[in-house]
Image (cartoon, grey):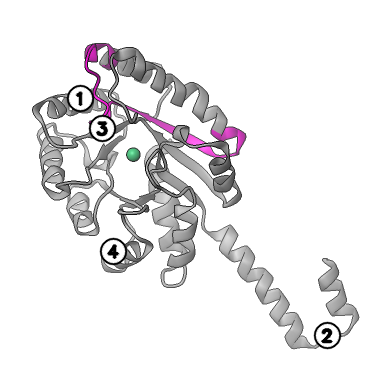
Amino acid sequence: MSSYCRELHREGADEYDLIFFYTIVVTLCWGVATVRIIDSHTHTYLRGPEDLDLMAVAGIEGAVVCSYLPVQPSGASTLKDLFNWQIGVESMRLSSYHIDCRVAVGIHPRSIPTNEIELVYDRLIAIFDNETATAMGEIGLEVGSKEEIDVFVQQLRIAKDYARPIIVHTPKNNKAAVFEKALAILKEEDVDGSKVIIDHLTPDLVPRAREFGALAGLTIRPGGASPGDVEAIISKCGPEGVVLGSDIGDSPSDPLALPRTVRQLMRSLSARDVELIVYSNIRALMWF
Ligand SMILES: [Zn+2]
């Protein structure tokens, strides 16, 4: 029993004080203990230890770490080293903060190497052969050029061969048109929608992704979805098939995006619905 609690009993505090005290304790424990959080889309290797500490203290227990580099790689070795960094170093760094990690590897459409792309495909195949990464990602289209489409298709075929989950990027500009192009390619390649997250969506595209059977990813960051957007879409369409991510990396983003969103959503949504979108839906796809 805490000293405050003992004092309440010793001084014969009235019943209402005790009820008030225990209500506060239960409310705090309920808020912390009932909603578990996995950040479904991060590039934590581009952030410092202070951010990982914040995430751990805020109760984030898992994170998906996706491939992306803010420079165009000059050859295969740059991407091979990125994959090694994610698999061999970053997952250990996260686990030292008690954050469980799943790694997604792939060639981001803004990180297509100028040379030796076949060697990168070979490395991806070797990684999935050895089962050292969980998923393919993030891959997809930025402007929808022929080169991007070719790289996207090659990677979809590798992911399909190994029955891996796939994280599909959608761009900031011209999002709806590029989304439709990526969706058409996923269908042409006969990709199983239930293994796909189509990410960085605007709320209006959530139903389109779900019609395909994919998880709809919403990114909580400046210029992305807001907690209010999430609340509106969940109230309208329900929590099934929706996942939230912070996309923390080199661009403006918030390591506490998900805990802050949870706090806001708990005012209007049930704990079950909130936990589906920040924990259970992503866990079902990536933690196997
Ligand atoms: Zn990303």
Magenta includes 105?
Answer: yes
Inter-mark Cα distance, 2 to 1: 69 Å
- Residue 60: image location, x then y, percent: 53, 48
Q: Which label sits on residue 233?
A: 4
Report the side of 16 relative to 34 (left or right). Answer: right
Task: Compare residues 50 and 141 and report the one nearer the observer.
Answer: 50
Is ligand 1 less than 8 Å from the beta carbon at label 4? no
Q: Which label sits on residue 87?
A: none
Q: Quadrant of ligand 1?
A: top left
Task: Check disc 1 and report the residue beneath it.
Answer: 157
- Amino acid residing under circle 3: Ile
Inter-mark Cα distance, 2 to 4: 46 Å
Sort mark 2 into few (<14), some (14-19) or many (20+) by Cα contacts within 10 Å: few
Report the span colored magenta. 94-120
Report the side of 113 relative to 59 (left or right). Answer: left
At x 19%, y 28%, the residue is: 152
Task: Check disc 2 and report the residue beneath it.
Answer: 13
Inter-mark Cα distance, 3 to 4: 25 Å
From the image, state whether disc 1 or disc 4 is nearer to you. Answer: 4
Task: Check disc 3 and report the residue beneath it.
Answer: 139
